[in-house]
Image (cartoon, helix red, strand yellow):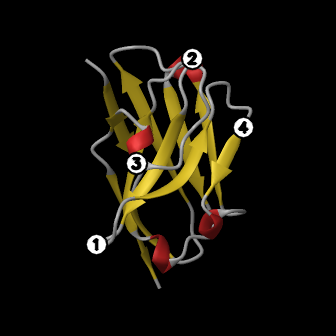
Amino acid sequence: QVQLVESGGGLVQAGGSLRLSCVGSGRTFSGYPMGWFRQAPGKEREFVAGINWTGSRTGYVDSVKGRFTISRDNAKNTVYLQMNSLKPEDTAVYYCAVRLDLYRDFGRKVNDYDYWGQGTQVTVSS
């Protein structure tokens, strides 16, 4: 059974940093693209960052470019999201997801992904 478990969320002041981790189990994710999404109260889930299966290609929503970095360690079946210079508008539940489409590029839509974690809360105070 495929499972994704996020960790690393919390409360941080504006300008601070957090590093989210997402550990997969149930199968290897090394050949599959992965992504991070977030959902704020009353808003739709939105794409934040994606990474292809090798880690050689990444993509970000414009609002986090230059501040967030996605990376992966295939040996650990783990994807990370380093978040710097956090802003109050980054407050949301953050989810990781895997696209079970071997060697494909990451997608930017919710429907591009097949399995999701339970989410981790990130709260940025002003």
Q: SS at mark 2?
A: helix
Percent of width and height locating residue 51: 61, 38
Q: Rounded to the nearest whole Å, what is the CA distance between mark 2 and mark 4?
A: 18 Å
Q: Nearer the viewer, mark 1 or mark 3?
A: 3
**Of the residues under marks 2 and 1, which one precedes in the sequence?**
1
Q: Residue at x 63, y 32 (%)?
A: 52
In the image, residue 19 sits, relative to residue 32, either above or below, namely below
**Residue tagged 1:** 41
Residue 21 visible = yes
Residues packed near mark 2 inside 10 Å, few (<14), some (14 to 19) or many (20 plus):
few
In the image, residue 115 sits, relative to residue 59, either above or below, namely above
**What is the three-letter code of the residue carrying label 1?**
Pro
**Residue tagged 4:** 57
Q: SS at mark 4?
A: loop
Q: Nearer the viewer, mark 3 or mark 4?
A: 3
Q: Rounded to the nearest whole Å, what is the CA distance between mark 1 and mark 4?
A: 30 Å
